[in-house]
Amino acid sequence: MKRAPNFLKQLLPYISLGIFIVLVIIGILFLSYILIIGAIIGLALFIIGYLKAKFFPTKFPQRPQQSQPPSRQGRIFDHNEFK
């Protein structure tokens, strides 16, 4: 088995550093694309939810109107009663 020339031994760290830098740049670009796509999807869901709430509001059941305020019924406990 032949030994690698001395020149290749000196050049190998720079080649591996270059490959590492390229992989980091590709990773950053990939992450930015994922973030942009996520922002677009989130904005679309927000707009859909806003339009749904604007044009199709939820209907709550109506409470019966009371003409008089309710009278206070029941027993009021004073704190001295439980000593």
Image (spheres, rainbow, N blue to C red):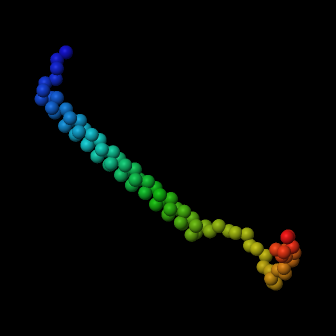
Marks counted in the figure total: 0
Residue 41 relative to residue 58: left or right: left
Residue 35 relative to residue 56: left or right: left
Residue 30 position, x and y percent, is 35, 47
Residue 51 relative to residue 66: left or right: left
Query: In this view, which residue lies farthest toward the top?
Result: 1
Q: Nearer the viewer, residue 22 or 33?
A: 22
Q: Residue at x 23, y 35 (%)?
A: 16
Image quadrant where residue 12 sits: top left
Residue 17 position, x and y percent, is 23, 39
In the rendered image, the vertical position of residue 75 relative to residue 68, given as above or below: above
Residue 6 position, x and y percent, is 12, 26
Image quadrant where residue 38 sits: bottom left
Quarter containing the N terminus? top left
Quarter containing the C terminus? bottom right
Residue 72 position, x and y percent, is 84, 79
Q: Nearer the viewer, residue 73 or 32?
A: 73
Query: In this view, which residue lies farthest toward the front?
Result: 83
Query: In this view, which residue lies farthest toward the bottom?
Result: 68
Q: Residue at x 82, y 74 (%)?
A: 79
Image quadrant where residue 20 sits: top left
Q: Residue at x 16, y 23 (%)?
A: 4
